[in-house]
Amino acid sequence: MKLIWSLIFLVLIVGVCFYWYGHSRGRVLKGDNWTAKQYGVNYIVSVHNGAELAAALNDFVQKNKITLGSITGIGAVNRATLRFFDPATKQYVDRTFDGQMEIANLTGNISTKDGEPYTHYHVTLGNRDYQGLAGHLLSADLNGAGEFFVTAVPGGRLERTFDEKIGLNFYDFSK
Ligand code: FE
């Protein structure tokens, strides 16, 4: 009987060691245009050169079923389409900028719309004259590195609802 308990204890200790070792080394994940490493609720995401940034990040979020979280990152692009929302007309004005630009900062959040992961990205881009350009990111072509840090809220969910009066998808804490 004593031997059985000793064996169970040994198996438990070995299990905990394996779990800790695996956890500290992280788990490598791969997508079509990204590679990531997971440490618990945190992910380090590298978007591949030449990929469309927003689509690659969206794919990462969807494949990992993240329904609530945040994204930050840096990198470089050679084309970006930004969107400006005009509250007076409730219209979007989209504009594409060409040329090599640094992503000085990308900040994004993850929530859900109709139950599906919904991402929202804003960027600050810097051109070769060190001048800044900023706005809501629609799409961008990565040219260089794309390094992102994603934090997920496990089991978290925050749904968005379209607000007719303002013309935007707002957080809906009643859902
Ligand atoms: Fe926005």
Image: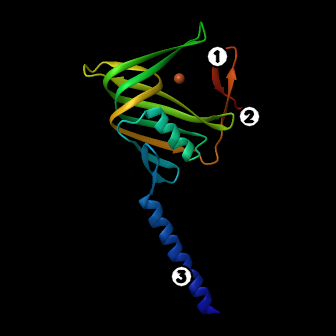
Q: Earlier in the sequence, mark 3 or mark 1?
A: 3
Tell me where residue 113 appears, x and y as whole percent: 65, 32
> Mark 2 Cα within 10 Å, few/some/many (few <14, many 20+)?
few
Q: Earlier in the sequence, mark 2 or mark 3?
A: 3
Tell me where residue 112 appears, x and y as whole percent: 64, 35
Residue positioned 45% across, 45% down in the render: 32
- Residue 88 vs 121, above or below: the answer is above
Amino acid type at image mark 1: Gly
Mark 1 vs mark 2, foreground winner is 1
Residue 152 is left or right of residue 34, and the answer is right
Amino acid type at image mark 3: Leu
Q: Depth check: give the residue in front, 46 or 108.
A: 46
Residue 175 - label: 2
The image quadrant that residue 170 belongs to is: top right
Q: Confirm if mark 3 falls within 8 A of ligand 1.
A: no
Q: Confirm if mark 1 falls within 8 A of ligand 1.
A: no
Amino acid type at image mark 2: Lys
Q: Depth check: give the residue in front, 164 or 53.
A: 53
Residue positioned 57% across, 81% down in the render: 9
Tell me where residue 80 appears, x and y as whole percent: 40, 24
The residue labelled by disc 3 is 10
Q: Determine the secondary structure under disc 3.
A: helix
The residue labelled by disc 1 is 167
Q: Quadrant of the C terminus?
A: top right
Q: Determine the secondary structure under disc 2.
A: loop
